[in-house]
Amino acid sequence: MRNLLIFALLASITASAQQHFAGIGTSSRGGIMSGLLNPAELANNPSKYDVFIFAPSIVASNNKLGIGDLIGGDNLEEKLFSGSETVNLRIDGEIVGPGFAYKHDKWTFALMTKAYARLDLVDVDPNIGDAIVNGGLNSLVSTTTLNNDYNQRLTGTSWGEVGISVARNLYDDQQHSFGAGVTLKILFPGSYANFGARDFNGTIVYAAGDVELTDASASVNIAYSGNLGESFSQFGDYTGSLFGKPNGFAADLGVNYRWKDEEEGRYKLNAGLAIRNLGGMTFSDTNNASTNYELNIPATESLNLNQFQDIESLQEVEEILLASGYLNRTENNATDFKVQLPATFVGYADVKIIQGFYATIFTQQKIKENNENDQIAVENVTSLTPRYLLNRNIEFYVPLSVNEISGFSAGFGFRAYGFFIGSSSAFTALSSNAKQADVYLGYGFRI
């Protein structure tokens, strides 16, 4: 378990907000990147052909450690599990692969590809983390009582998708246009691992270098598939299985309104609403397992938590708990199990302030809570992005975001023709207290 968390912390150093491609999705250029945010935006594509090549994005955010802590590298695990606030940590990679859009009259058709890799800690009790990873270094007393009524999760996921999009202008005149679009996605599950502990109650006892758990109970889910069943403490555990076999479907639905600006040939207002990632995928592999257990440790007995410090997989966790005799199977799921995508509601409005200057208001809100064991986690984000258009091909923008995990961040982005590069935390990441870092770039062109 220690190795898994060290990997998460080190990855946070190299990852450079939880909203991928902040600012470029609502760029006036539109095209494939805007279509990924809202499929209705494809109807606004001014060119007959739009070709997208490649765009990677990586995100790291947490609610405990600042950039200064990560760069210093001292006592990271001790700091992460200090205090009483539950620990939330996300490391999220996304790659937009080749894509193509074709416009014919009022219709636009597109083919888009993406791949994902994620590691999440969701609402982890710092006392449990401190006991397992640090041997109780943060504890000032000999015993700690646990009384949690929520589900704590450690989960990793990788998958790919191929989306087919259709968008159409339903109404279009010299001043206004209204469009709608849909993207149907074929999902390619790669690997998955989840450890969930719901209603975790008990007592942690610290004595003579040992950390014991006694008088404890919890509902436990242990699930794994593919590479992440054997280990998810290394970068290659994720990249080695981004695309599995097709085994799932999802959909994005969206609408768009545009108030045109005849003077500049752009718009005074471009607004949209979308529901994204409606659906899920089924993991199927020779080492698949998804089992529900009840953990029960009597008050007269105890489980030594020191034995979890150097493990690298959930299979090892499961084996240790089963060997202890305190873990009892309550439900053995089928070898194939389904995981839901992180469904979100998206709303935005890009408003012309004066000639060349625009401002985008954006919100992303999760539809389902992150504490369910079969749910890929996602965060709520709200942002304001001022942007300056030097001309049709050059623009600069400054995303100002609030993330429910890491708080406020400020970044910078730049687009020249079809090339773009940016970060929603380029400025705040310079502060030692910043809890979020990200970076992205990409390229596409029109014919």
Image: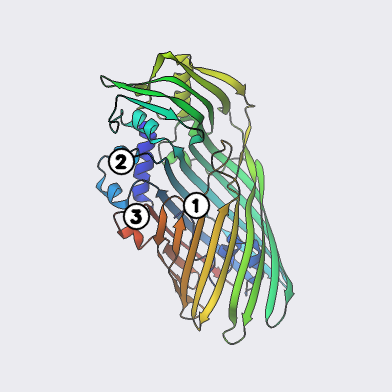
Horizontal and vertical percent position of residue 264:
56, 85
Q: Within 10 Å of the Cα at label 3, are there few (<14), some (14-19), or many (20+) other Cα atoms? A: many
- Callout 1–callout 3 Cβ contact below 8 Å: no
Instruction: Look at mark 1 in the image and give the residue it sits on.
Output: 94
Instruction: Look at mark 3 in the image and give the residue it sits on.
Output: 434
- Callout 2–callout 3 Cβ contact below 8 Å: no
Instruction: Look at mark 2 in the image and give the residue it sits on.
Output: 79
Q: Is residue 105 left or right of residue 426?
A: right
Horizontal and vertical percent position of residue 333:
63, 26
Identity, as a three-letter code, of the amino acid under mark 2: Lys
In 3D space, how far apart are the residues under numbered discs 2 and 1 (Cα atoms)? 28 Å
Q: Is residue 162 left or right of residue 384?
A: right
Horizontal and vertical percent position of residue 390:
46, 80
Quadrant position of the N terminus in the picture: top left
Helix, strand or loop at disc 2?
Answer: helix
The mark that comes first in sequence, 2 or 3, is 2
- Residue 20 visible? The answer is yes
Give the mark toward the camera: 1 or 3.
3
Count up the numbered dots. 3
Helix, strand or loop at disc 1?
Answer: strand
The mark that comes first in sequence, 1 or 3, is 1
Q: Within 10 Å of the Cα at label 1, are there few (<14), some (14-19), or many (20+) other Cα atoms? A: many
Horizontal and vertical percent position of residue 413:
43, 67
Identity, as a three-letter code, of the amino acid under mark 1: Glu
Write down the quadrant of residue 263 in the picture. bottom right
Identity, as a three-letter code, of the amino acid under mark 3: Ala
The mark that comes first in sequence, 2 or 1, is 2
- Callout 2–callout 1 Cβ contact below 8 Å: no
- Residue 29 visible? The answer is no
